[in-house]
Amino acid sequence: MMNSRIQTIRLQRDIDELFAEGRSLGRTGKDTLVVSGKYLLRELPEPNAPALLLLYHAPKKFTKPAHERNKLKRWMREAVRISDQMKNVSELVEGNSKQLLILMRITQPPSKDCNWQHIEGDVKKIGEVLMTKLLQNK
């Protein structure tokens, strides 16, 4: 079961591996409205390692003020926390003794086109896409 406190990617080697070998989850404008993503499924590096690691990114290119970037990342974290799709993904990965690294990247500043509802909907779509991809790889 997914912990109430979701683990974030902290090690640079994990981030480098995610960018080098990760696969696309959703492209903004095509699959999702404001959140794009990448994922990497790999073997557990150690027995007690968390099954699900996330990295939230809100680039300065799209959102200059730090408080706005932080708000977007909080929204993404909360959307992942409450998403049933992401809970199902976490349980599936744990059951297969794998580790899933996920990057979620916001591609617009907060506005009427980028708000909580858009982010929550995109996280649900990303969870559905992940579930489909994971079930295909079984």
Image (cartoon, grey):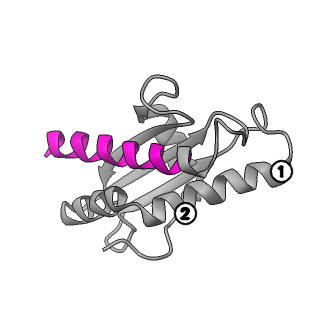
Q: Residue furthest right?
A: 65
10 Å crowding of disc 2: few (<14), some (14-19), many (20+):
some
Task: Identify the mark at residue 78; answer none if there is no mark.
Answer: 2
Magenta-drawn segment: 119-138
Task: Identify the residue at image location x=59%, y=59%.
Answer: 10
Task: Identify the residue at image location x=57%, y=36%.
Answer: 34
Residue 127 on the magenta segment: yes
Residue at which label 1 appears: 66
Q: Residue furthest front?
A: 112
Task: Residue type at mark 1: give it.
Answer: Ala
Indicate the quadrant containing the N terminus: top left, top right, bottom left or bottom right: bottom left
At which x and y percent is residue 127?
35, 49
- Give the secondary structure at mark 2: helix
From this view, report whether residue 11 is shown above or below residue 107: below
> Which numbered disc flags the more N-terminal residue, 1 or 2?
1
At which x and y percent is residue 89?
29, 56
Task: Identify the residue at image location x=77%, y=31%.
Answer: 61
